[in-house]
Amino acid sequence: MEADNIFHELLQRLEQYHRDLTEGSFVRYHEPEELKAILRLDRPEGRGDWTELMAWVEQYLAYAVKTANPGYLNRMWAGANLPSIIGEMVTAVTNTSACTYETAPVSTLMEQYLLRELLELVGFSHGVGQMTTGSSNANMIVMMAARNNACAQSKTVGLFGQARLVAFVNRDAHYSMDRAAAILGIGTEQLIKVATDDHGRMDPQALEQALLRVEQEGGVPFFVAATAGTTVRGAYDPLEPLLALRERFGFWLHVDGAWGGAAVLSDRLRTRFLPLLEQADSFTLDFHKMLGTALMCNVLLFNNRPDILRDICSAGDESYIFRQGADGEIRDLGTQSLQCGRRVDALKLFLDWKFYGLEGFGRRVEGYLELCRYAEQRILELEELEMVVPRESFNLCFRHLPPPGVSAEEFTIALRNRMQQLERGLVGTGYVDGQLALRLLVTNQNVDQGAIDTFLDNILLTGRELIAQPPAE
């Protein structure tokens, strides 16, 4: 095989792989040691053999998880949109960094265009945004912005001799908040996990009491994160009472919409799930989740603070790389980023945005919610299954009833693992109020009512098999 033909050979294989994504099982399952023996990763290197290289590609494709397959229901993301896949391929071939205009002129203008569109959509006037490596990174950047806002000298002097800064999140908030508090010097003990109501939403009264307690102890409540779609249950924290508390206590109110923020793309769902979002201080949304853009693709937006990113992210002598426009306008996006080199993520999102449009994305999210309603109704109709908690939005937390004498948690783990090993489906799990549940997420374009039925049928089949097994001695 010659190098001149490598793209032809590669695209043939990728085209076949993409064509077969929805066929058969989501994976050819093997335990790690078995797969190591099959792959033989320790074979000699350095031969410069394109045929051998293509054999590695074929092996990768053969044993990779088909995340676009209807049996893949495991994560908040699934197979990618074809326009964004095209964008990823072009990005790889052109191989540049989005940190400066001179190295990435087209992606710079695309990213700026997309951010203006999204700031307008969310209703953030005089705002600014950036594309980050994901909502974990975005949440840390926002917490840093709130820290610097509350303690103006923290960027230069640090937190030495300052009052104790305290942040507040839903007790079911994503673990990226804990990591952000650790990295930024806030400390995880200063991240208060606020109690929730019976819907899994942050309890405003519990938050108010926690805010008062911190102030009485001499601390500074500087940051509150409202979760728009908690990871396991899919609950949306109520924005209206949190905004009222912000007026009293002066904290920064961030909306972590990594998962459920996609509702903003539908007028109907935004009114239901994200009322008053336009009054928040910041908002983050992962396009690689419900909206299907290729991993990773996050947007972070700030309200009424056009210079905040430059203020918090820029430091040190940048003169060797970053330039300003003739009018003083920022033209190099890297100066507003924590990274030096920045991956080009704008192209894949731009192609998705132009191909599907706002209405297309909105219909997709609405369709997912309808499928969740359908799945919930089916679960309620089946005697062997039960909802662990009622559905709040796009997440279904349910389980198969265990046989007598077997704990529900033990049975749920065994069922989930057997489903994976027999290649019947890959579904996640999560704890809700101390109970382990199967966590069904609908974020796969190839999942329809028929796929939901097949998945539930496989749950029932696997449950019957486990119940029929003789107990282990």
Image: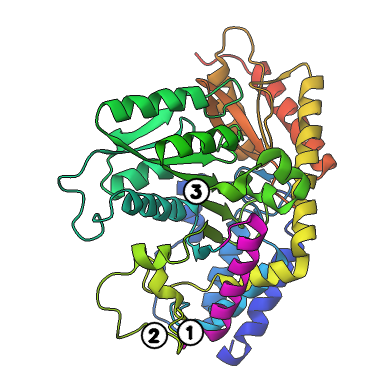
Number of the front mark, 2 or 3: 2
Q: Which residue is mark 2?
A: 323
Q: Which residue is mark 3?
A: 34
Mark 2–mark 1 CB contact (< 8 Å): yes
Q: Secondary structure at mark 2?
A: loop
**270 relative to 10, above or below:** above
Q: Give percent across and percent down for residue 123.
A: 63, 56
**234 relative to 198, above or below:** below
Number of the front mark, 2 or 1: 2
User: Residue at coordinates 45% horizontally, 47% vertically from top-left?
Assistant: 33
Q: Which is more N-terminal, label 1 or label 3?
A: 3
Label 2, residues with CA under 10 Å away: few <14, some 14-19, many ≥20: some
User: Residue at coordinates 76% horizontally, 49% vertically from top-left?
Assistant: 267
**297 relative to 5, above or below:** above
Report the disc number at residue 101.
1
Q: Quadrant of the N terminus?
A: bottom right
Number of the front mark, 3 or 1: 1
Count of number-bearing discs: 3
Q: Secondary structure at mark 1?
A: loop
Numbered range of the magenta stretch = 101-125
Q: Which is more N-terminal, label 1 or label 2?
A: 1
Report the disc number at residue 128.
none
- Asked whether 102 falls inside the magenta stretch, the response is yes
The quadrant holding residue 424 is: top right
- Observer-nearest of 379 and 185: 185
Q: CA distance from mark 3 to mark 1?
A: 48 Å
